[in-house]
Amino acid sequence: MNEFIDHLRHREYMSGVERDEARVNATGEVFTPNWFAEKMIDEIQQDDFTDPTVTYLDPNCGDGNILSEVIIRKLQCGSTLEQALQTTYGVDIMPDNVKLCRDRLLCGKEEFRHIVEQNIVCADSLTYHYRFDGSVADVKESVLDEFFS
């Protein structure tokens, strides 16, 4: 388990990827530092991590700082990596962030790639349908359409 925790937690801020000013202005990307992700997860009722069926979603997952802490807590409470991945979901609008997040959460266990490919998706979190089944939402299902109609 310690090798998974090291892989998940000990990363360069923003995965070491330089994000130029134009990209930050266009996407509004703001990354959660590791120390703050840990503090946020501390605020969740820790008993939730002992139930391997409880699911977690980060609708703006970036490179996975918050989801990494979720996986760590699940592992520390007895879940296997496979169980933890099966109940952890993320959405990000940037394809490179999604790739970084998937690779990070896998902890080098390629046999679970199919799980992160399904559960960590590249989409607009305001319009994504949150079925995580590979289908694409149509315009009528858009959260914004429902809100403004």
Image (spheres, helix red, strand yellow):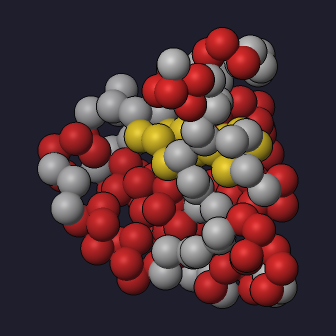
Residue drawn where x is 37% and y is 48% of the image: 74
Q: Residue at x 40, y 33 (%)?
A: 55
Q: Is residue 120 left or right of residue 42?
A: right
Task: Tell me which residue sits at (57%, 75%) in the image.
Answer: 31
Is residue 107 at least partly visible in the picture?
Answer: no
Relative horizontal placement of residue 69, taking residue 141 as reference (left or right): left
Above or below — where is 18 with respect to 81? below
Q: Residue furthest front?
A: 149
Q: Position of residue 149 (x, y in %)?
A: 51, 19
Position of residue 131 measured from the top left corner of the image (x, y, whole percent): 60, 19
Q: How many marks?
A: 0
Above or below for 13 versus 95: below
Residue 5 is situated, as x and y percent measured from the top left of the image, at 50, 68
When asked about the image quadrant of residue 110, the answer is top right
The percent coordinates of residue 114 (x first, y second) are 76, 31
Front residue of 67/111: it is 67
Residue depicted at 67% across the width and 79% down the height:
14
Along the viewing direction, whichever of 94 and 52 lies nearer the viewer = 94
Residue 76's place in the image compared with 135, above or below, is below
Q: In the rendered view, would you say 12 is above or below 1?
A: below
Q: Quadrant of residue 100?
A: bottom right
120 to the left or right of 9: right
Viewer-side residue, 16 vs 137:
137
> Is residue 113 among the parts visible in the rendering?
yes
